[in-house]
Image (cartoon, rainbow, N blue to C red):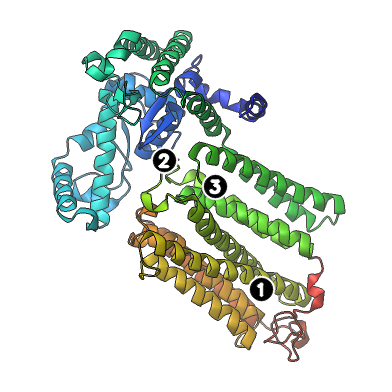
Amino acid sequence: MTKQGHLLLGILIAWGCADAGEAGLPGFDFTEIGKVLVQHKGRVKPLDTYAREVVSKVTGREKFRASASPSGGNLPGGDARAVFLSWTFESEKWQEARFIRVNYRPFKERIGLDPDEVYFSFGDLAGSESLEKLQRKVHAKSMREGEDAKLDRMEREVMDVAGKVELVHGLFEGYALAVIPHPSDRNGRWLPMPAVSQRVPEAAEAARSGVLDQWVAVGTAFRERRGVEFNQEASKLLASLNALFERVHKEETSRALSQADWETDYNRLHAFRFSAGFYFLGLVMFLISLHWRSGPFYAACQAVLGVGVLVQVCGFALRIYITQRPPVSNMYESMVFMGFMLTVFSIVFELVYRSRIFGIAASALSVMLLILADQLPLDRGMDPLVPVLRTNYWLTVHVLTVMSAYAALTLAMGVGHINLGIYFFAPHRKELLAQMTLFLYRSLQLGFLLITAGTILGAWWAGEAWGRYWGWDPKETWALICILGYGILLHGRMAGFWGPFGTAVGSVIAWSLVGMCYYGVNFVLGAGLHSYGFGDGGIQFAIGYLVVETLIVAASFYGRYGRKFPADSVHAAAGRGHPEGQGKKKDSDGAIGPAAAGSA
């Protein structure tokens, strides 16, 4: 990677220099300490990444601000690196501070915690006999049943919270930060800094290099809030640890250090936040363009979306370079990719049909997806994949196809909502309804084609990975239900069982199948062989979504059938069995003729 590339990224992340100020530590620069290499989950990563992952896991958010420490002293907050270093070097301040996030109410009631609180102190959890008993029970079950152990929601929560407590305890004691490379085994387990003071044989070289003294100096400067000294000692520590790494990993040193530099740049760039900003600006501009019919302004709307796409491509390129795999291995990456493909599809449809509707629908949905991906406590890690996923060919072909299908069907859902809005607010706009129905039909066709192809490719991959093409795993079953649901919707439209209004309603209802396949199997059911995508909870969000969509559909039915309009105001010449508007029968839901290709 070139110096020019770093210069370009440096311009984009100039605002990142304010991070230290957010932490309440003026004069501190966490850039050098953030580049210290750490071994974690089978990957060598910069401390910058490790700190963000740990703080996000424990607190539920990357930028965390704790209330004042009950034991006295100020607690740095806002910057994950500052919080992480504070846990490491001044753990006494955090013993009674509330910073460990626990969401599941039944679990809190089970171990005697206040169910209305969200954050708890290390002392609350580490000293809980109820939690310790539950953990032993779940651990025994896991050991007894092995890989086939099926943990329920409560048991998974027990292990998750116990894991957070163990991680925090390891940080407090200094054992959760493996920064010293094994002196002889390139694949060996790295050592934490306490191994040097305990004279562990594998840490002898590190002891001779003086890294322990430098580590202590960094900690002292941090605790005493001496920013200039901290920055100097961090640079010395980084140089010493890199020299230790080079002794063992000579051929890999250059790439590893370069990769660490780019990874810290990626962390500070927040490319997907930038792209969300461009998409939001594009949404506002497209809405303005509905009233200001200017050709140059319309081109500017498309250009803004294009810039957002380019920023996302930059973010994807960095993740691919860092991980050496397609960026669609977890819920965070897949949500970001869906937002990307939504915008790409909208730009293509915009170029074909010259309509602002696709830009409005896609930019609104993309902004929503990217904001959710950024704000929800999702795993954003770039760690090695589980064995079944370690094939870039199938990961690229199958997963990208399926996520593109979800994006197309989500776009169809967005257009369907716009159609229902027209039926409620302006059912007399028959030409607009005709045009919008064509747009909806095209989106559904694309999504149906991709979801079918993606499911077939998934079965092919399953045959290679698991020795069977189909096993009625929950994810496989719901993928088939998605195909059948959208197949019924499209074929029913072709057969004339329902018209444009029914298709719009169906596009909204059918997306619940996508939501169940994409989100529900992992976060609500929590079952199946696709365990690499599991999360916990979320049933309240699923119910809330269904309630809102039910109200929207009910309102559209009222707008369509509950109010009286002149008979000829909502009739048009579109055959039920001919979505292109070439039919011989009239359809009371609106025309879908050749004129639909015009501008909205």
- How far separated are the C-alphas under marks 2 and 3? 23 Å
568 up-or-down from 95: above or below = below
Query: Mark 1 to mark 3: distance in Å?
Result: 28 Å
Q: Does the CB distance between marks 2 and 1 fall below 8 Å? A: no
Residue 280 spot, x, y in % from top left: 66, 48
Q: Which residue is mark 3?
A: 371
Q: Which mark is residue 383?
A: 2
On the image, which quarter does residue 197 sit in? top left
Residue 209: give x, y in percent of width and height: 35, 9
Instruction: Pick the residue in front: 599 or 570.
Output: 599
Q: Dot 1 corresponds to which residue?
A: 441
Q: In the image, what residue type sits under mark 3?
A: Ile
Q: Earlier in the sequence, mark 2 or mark 1?
A: 2
Lateral position of residue 90 relative to residue 273, left or right: left
- Tell me if residue 520 comes above or below residue 191 in the rendering: below
User: Which amino acid lies under the numbered mark 1 shown in the image of this protein?
Assistant: Tyr
Q: Does label 2 or label 3 sit earlier along the sequence?
A: 3
User: Viewer-nearest of labels 2 and 3?
Assistant: 2
